[in-house]
């Protein structure tokens, strides 16, 4: 068996699955101020980590930034300059 062609590799790539409930929630709450890509990123993060919520700064996009926190804890909310920064923080947290 020879090397795989790019089309075969692409067919095996894992496509992230976004929970439609999370996507609808994020889009309903923040769809007017976020781009579709940002809505998808936040919905994906909340699908991957259901105990976390992410929301944009109230004056977004004039004051960029995202707040996030773990649900059902006393943990104070955190702030990141981007959704990727919030994801990096969440991925580094235990449990």
Image (cartoon, rainbow, N blue to C red):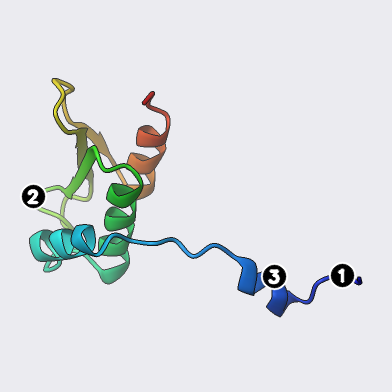
Left or right: residue 2 versus residue 36 is: right
Sequence-first tag of 2 and 1: 1
Question: In the picture, residue 87 is in which quadrant?
Answer: top left
Within-10-Å neighbours for mark 1: few <14, some 14–19, many 20+: few
Q: Quadrant of the N terminus?
A: bottom right
Badge 1 element: loop
Residue 62 percent coordinates (x, y): 15, 56
Left or right: residue 26 versus residue 10 is: left
Q: For residue 9, which numbered disc appears in the image?
A: 3
Sequence-first tag of 1 and 3: 1
Q: CA distance from mark 1 to mark 3?
A: 10 Å
Residue 68 percent coordinates (x, y): 21, 38
Question: In the picture, residue 50 is in which quadrant?
Answer: top left
Residue 80 percent coordinates (x, y): 29, 39
**Residue hosting label 1:** 3
Residue nearest the observer in this picture, 55 or 24: 24
**Residue at x 16%, y 65% (from the top left corner):** 24
| Relative height, residue 73 to residue 85 (above, below) | above
Within-10-Å neighbours for mark 3: few <14, some 14–19, many 20+: few
**Residue hosting label 2:** 58
Badge 3 element: helix
Residue 71 percent coordinates (x, y): 16, 33
Between label 2 and label 1, give the one nearer the viewer. 1
């Amino acid at each position: 068996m020879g090397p795989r062609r790019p089309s075969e590799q692409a067919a095996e790539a894992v496509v992230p699955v976004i929970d439609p409930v999370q996507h609808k929630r994020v889009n309903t709450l923040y769809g007017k101020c976020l781009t579709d890509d940002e809505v998808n990123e936040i919905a994906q993060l909340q699908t991957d980590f259901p105990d976390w919520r992410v929301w944009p700064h109230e004056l977004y996009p004039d004051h960029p930034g995202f707040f996030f926190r773990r649900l059902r804890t006393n943990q104070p909310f955190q702030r990141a300059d981007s959704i990727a920064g919030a994801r990096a923080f969440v991925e580094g947290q235990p449990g």
